[in-house]
């Protein structure tokens, strides 16, 4: 990237941050303080990884001479069974252990199911709410939030309470303004839309044109409308939602 200069040759600043021009022409306000914090955090993580690796190597020295870990574990288990033989036979111990595991699993299965249901509801609320509140969708897209979610929703996930996004290759989408940090929702969605093969059909002011063309938007009946070209450009999941919620006009 290179610095953006004004007509007088001075660096352009936005909110106190120098503005850079990316290779694709987009303007990025570089957050120097956030970048330094990220570098410091990554250096700390690297030191932690090195210390854990050294500690692991130290512990492994105690196992020098043991080539077959499975055989060693079986030998230890045999010794445990022999110690327990005063109470019950080794084969009986395995049966009792298996029954105990089944009992615990049965007791906690409803709790696990409820946890998974609550997590799914949380993900739906957080990600669905982000689509509904998105300024990028409201200001830049010619399709409503539910169609945008049908087209791009699978790219978003919830990690430790934070929404993150990945591109079509499964790579994390990072912020251009805050290098090393995940992009926020609207920045990630803009990146996904930029890479969408038919993006001109879903952007406001793009796609169909001419005297008879109609842009996507609410009609007099309250339903959204979109052109046939815009509908044909949507992903399969978005087409299903559009057929239900929108009026297709030729």
Image (spheres, rainbow, N blue to C red):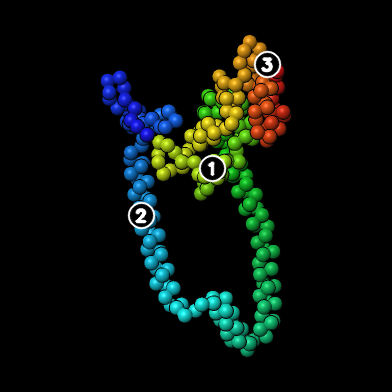
Q: Dot 1, crowdedness within 10 Å: few (<14), some or many (≥20)?
A: many
Whether residue 124 appears in this view of the structure is yes
Q: Is residue 157 left or right of residue 106?
A: left
Q: Is residue 49 left or right of residue 222?
A: left
Whether residue 241 appears in this view of the structure is no
Q: Quadrant of residue 180?
A: top left
Distance from label 2 to label 3 (Cα)?
58 Å
Q: Earlier in the sequence, mark 1 or mark 2?
A: 2
Across and down, in percent, residue 212 comes to 66, 12
Work out which residue is located at the far front of the displayed protein and give it.
23
Q: Nearer the viewer, mark 2 or mark 3?
A: 2
Taking depth in this image into account, of 114 and 201 the one nearest to the observer is 201
Looking at the rendered structure, the secondary structure element under dot 2 is helix
Q: Residue at x 34, y 27 (%)?
A: 4
* Image mark for residue 44: 2
- Do labels 1 and 2 touch, CB within 8 Å? no
* Image mark for residue 220: 3
Q: Earlier in the sequence, mark 2 or mark 3?
A: 2
């Amino acid at each position: 990237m290179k610095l953006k200069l004004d007509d007088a040759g001075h660096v352009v600043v936005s909110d106190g941050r120098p503005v850079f021009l990316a290779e694709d022409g987009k303007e990025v306000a570089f957050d120097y303080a956030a970048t330094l914090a990220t570098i410091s955090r990554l250096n700390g993580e690297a030191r932690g990884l090195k210390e854990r690796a050294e500690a692991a190597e130290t512990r492994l020295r105690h196992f020098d001479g043991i080539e077959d870990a499975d055989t060693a574990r079986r030998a230890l288990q045999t010794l445990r069974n022999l110690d327990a033989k005063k109470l019950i036979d080794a084969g009986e111990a395995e049966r009792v252990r298996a029954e105990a595991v089944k009992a615990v699993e049965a007791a906690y299965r409803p709790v696990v199911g409820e946890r998974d249901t609550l997590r799914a509801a949380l993900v739906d609320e957080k990600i669905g709410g982000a689509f509904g509140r998105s300024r990028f969708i409201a200001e830049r897209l010619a399709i409503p939030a539910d169609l945008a979610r049908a087209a791009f929703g699978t790219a978003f996930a919830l990690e430790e309470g934070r929404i993150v996004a990945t591109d079509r290759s499964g790579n994390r989408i990072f912020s251009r303004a805050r290098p090393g940090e995940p992009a926020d929702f609207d920045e990630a969605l803009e990146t996904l839309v930029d890479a969408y093969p038919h993006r001109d059909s879903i952007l406001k002011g793009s796609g169909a044109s001419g005297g008879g063309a109609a842009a996507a938007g609410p009609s007099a009946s309250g339903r959204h409308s979109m052109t046939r070209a815009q509908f044909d450009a949507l992903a399969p999941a978005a087409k299903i939602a559009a057929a239900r919620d929108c009026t297709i006009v030729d």
